Image: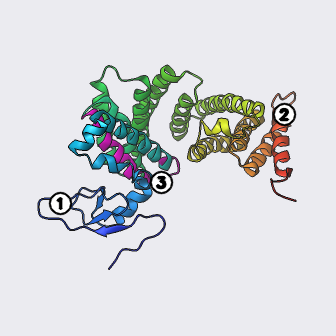
């Protein structure tokens, strides 16, 4: 029975090779029976693995693989081995970004092919057991975490931890990411004390790498607050969530003000910082803080206004006026409950900008 295809797949053709020249499946390394017709250098054991790879990463890198996988003495002489290695290094970046984007979208199964290819390329470029492999280990761990494969996650993180321990030159950023992944694993297994240890280390190394008020460090505050919430330590949670809100408010206010100043290029500034998937991830975190503040027995209108204003700015800059208007209205209602509230004027200005965009005629309209 011939496999069916859709616009989301590449055509494949049956593979018949002489004994001793068998090809391996891109995803599982079993003997391949199919070949991608578009690039001619990628092989699969069945149509399901071909589809998974196409959706996960192959669509983005199909033609990029041709010069790398058709290396000959002549091609190496023309391009040079250094240029081939550079092409592979660029593929690592493409795969890392694709895998991370899928993870932000909550699609770990689709992230897995890109994470695997990132690891394979990283080994080819940098060698085994080198510090440059750690980002690939962490991507693979996060994808498998989403699939509930905790034993495999523990194995991957253990390998990453060993590499970092043997590499004195490991950056603070890498150590932060490793501890964050370890913390997430311990949350998933219910070991909250171990999770606190690793998230505390994540915050320490993130502070060293990015600064105390960085949005990267801020994510560590959010994660450790979630653990304290599970332990019922609500005063600590309130304090940490307040810090999360303040850091994001300062960051988004700077982006918003810069956007207003540079209104001739709307969206440009945010585009350089976030893609759609990352915005969704930030939205998820800030919504969790907002829901906590709204349901807290010690309801604080100032905190509600701050977080809602963050979400309004996030989606205004992301080009979603309805969401910006909804969160802006929530922020304004909360802000009006506070005497001498400094947020009222910025919130009103944001709402006016959103409303003016909604009433402006579109180009070409009568």
Q: Main secondary structure of the magenta part?
A: helix
- Pick whichever, 29 or 23, lies toward us: 23
Picture residue at 34% right of the left edge, 67% below the top: 12
Image location (x, y in percent) of residue 261: 77, 30
Residue under numbered circle 2: 344
Residue 44 shown left or right of residue 53 in the figure: left
Counting from the top left corner in percent of width and height, residue 275 is at 58, 43
**Which mark is first along the chain, 1 or 3?**
1
Query: Residue at the location (25% across, 33% down)?
Result: 129
Of badges 1 and 2, nearer the viewer stands 1
Residue that numbered label 1 is attached to: 22
Q: Earlier in the sequence, mark 1 or mark 2?
A: 1
The x and y percentages for residue 163 are 28, 30
Task: Give the label on residue 240, or none.
Answer: none
**Which residue is nearer to you in this view: 297 or 104?**
104
Q: Is residue 165 magenta?
A: no
Q: Quadrant of the C terminus?
A: bottom right
- Helix, strand or loop at disc 2? helix
What residue did someone put label 3 on?
107
């Amino acid at each position: 029975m011939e496999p069916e295809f859709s616009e989301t797949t590449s055509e494949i053709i049956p593979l018949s090779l002489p004994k001793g020249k068998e090809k391996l499946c891109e995803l599982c390394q079993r003997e391949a029976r199919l070949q991608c017709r578009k690039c001619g250098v990628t092989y699969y054991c069945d149509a399901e693995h071909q589809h998974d790879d196409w959706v996960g990463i192959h669509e983005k890198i199909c033609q990029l693989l041709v010069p790398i996988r058709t290396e000959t003495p002549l091609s190496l002489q023309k391009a040079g081995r250094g240029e081939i290695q550079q092409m592979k290094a660029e593929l690592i970046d493409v795969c890392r970004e694709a895998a991370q984007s899928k993870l932000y979208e909550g699609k770990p199964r689709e992230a897995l092919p890109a994470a695997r290819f990132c690891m394979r390329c990283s080994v080819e470029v940098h060698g085994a057991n080198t510090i440059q492999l750690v980002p690939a280990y962490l991507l693979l761990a996060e994808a498998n975490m989403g699939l509930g494969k905790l034993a495999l996650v523990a194995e991957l993180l253990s390998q990453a931890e060993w590499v970092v321990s043997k590499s004195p030159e490991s950056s603070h950023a890498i150590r932060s990411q490793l501890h964050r992944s370890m913390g997430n694993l311990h949350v998933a297994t219910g070991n909250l004390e171990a999770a606190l240890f690793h998230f505390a280390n994540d915050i320490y190394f993130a502070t060293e790498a990015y600064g105390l008020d960085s949005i990267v460090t801020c994510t560590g505050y959010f994660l450790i607050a979630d653990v304290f919430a599970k332990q019922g330590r609500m005063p600590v949670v309130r304090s940490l969530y307040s810090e999360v809100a303040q850091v994001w408010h300062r960051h988004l206010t700077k982006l918003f003000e810069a956007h207003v100043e540079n209104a001739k290029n709307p969206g440009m500034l945010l585009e350089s910082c976030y893609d759609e998937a990352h915005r969704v991830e930030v939205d998820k975190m800030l919504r969790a803080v907002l829901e906590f503040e709204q349901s807290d027995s010690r309801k604080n209108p100032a905190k509600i206004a701050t977080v809602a204003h963050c979400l309004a700015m996030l989606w205004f800059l992301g080009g979603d006026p309805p969401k910006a208007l909804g969160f802006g209205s929530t922020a304004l209602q909360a802000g009006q409950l506070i005497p001498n509230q400094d947020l009222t004027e910025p919130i009103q200005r944001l709402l006016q900008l959103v409303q003016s965009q909604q009433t402006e005629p579109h180009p070409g309209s009568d």
